[in-house]
């Protein structure tokens, strides 16, 4: 953390897998109930399965929060900001959820 005019601010850093996992999540939410495998690359199928296995275990509220944020805007920080402003949620727990879920998906997919 760094000090800025007496306030503590968290430095946001991206892991090497962040953009790829974001892509995986966006693909998953286009067809969350099932995936037609005909014509899909093996990587797409494995990505969908990794996201589905993590999303399935989340509480409904967290899953809905993630889907809402990812559907809202391609720019994730902007989507989180808008979501928090509209719902009155605090950004820190939302970012913690997104980071935790991305890490779980990356692990499930074998990226870490």
Image: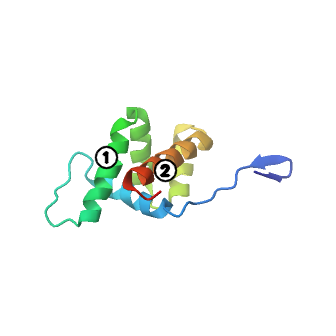
Name the residue nearer the viewer: 3 or 74: 3
Which structural element holds mark 1?
Answer: helix
Say the numbered circle drawn on residue 83: none
Report whether 112 appears left or right of 25.
right
- 51 on left or right of 93: left
Q: Residues within 10 Å of mark 2 (few under 14, many from 20)?
A: some
Write the residue at 49% across / 50% down.
103
Locate residue 47: give its quadrant: bottom left
As measured in the structure, the alpha-carbon distance from the residue carrying label 2 to the one carrying label 1 is 14 Å
Q: Residue at x 47, y 56 (%)?
A: 112
The answer to the question of whether label 2 and label 1 lie on touching residues, with beta carbons closer than 8 A, is no
- Name the residue at 16% across, 56% down: 36
User: Does residue 20 appear in this view?
Assistant: yes
Badge 2 element: helix
**Residue at the farthest right position:** 6
Q: Quadrant of residue 110?
A: bottom left
Q: How many C-alpha atoms fall within 10 Å of the one at disc 1: few (<14), some, or many (≥20)?
A: some
Does label 2 or label 1 sit earlier along the sequence? 1
Residue lying furthest left: 38
Residue 101 in picture, x, y percent from top left: 46, 46
In the picture of the structure, the residue carrying the numbered disc 1 is: 52
Residue 87 shown left or right of residue 111 in the figure: right
Picture coordinates of residue 52, whole percent (x, y): 31, 46
Residue beneath disc 2: 103
Q: Residue at x 70, y 50 (%)?
A: 10
Q: Specify whether residue 29 is in view.
A: no
């Amino acid at each position: 953390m760094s000090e800025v005019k007496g306030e503590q601010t968290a430095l946001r850093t991206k892991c090497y897998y962040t953009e790829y996992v974001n892509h995986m999540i966006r693909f998953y939410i286009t067809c969350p109930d099932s995936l037609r495998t005909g014509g899909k690359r093996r990587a797409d199928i494995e990505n969908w399965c990794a996201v589905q296995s993590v999303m399935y275990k989340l509480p409904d509220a967290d899953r809905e929060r993630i889907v809402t944020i990812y559907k809202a805007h391609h720019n994730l920080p902007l989507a989180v900001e808008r979501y928090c402003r509209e719902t009155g949620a605090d950004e820190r727990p939302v970012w913690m959820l997104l980071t935790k879920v991305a890490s779980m998906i990356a692990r499930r997919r074998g990226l870490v």
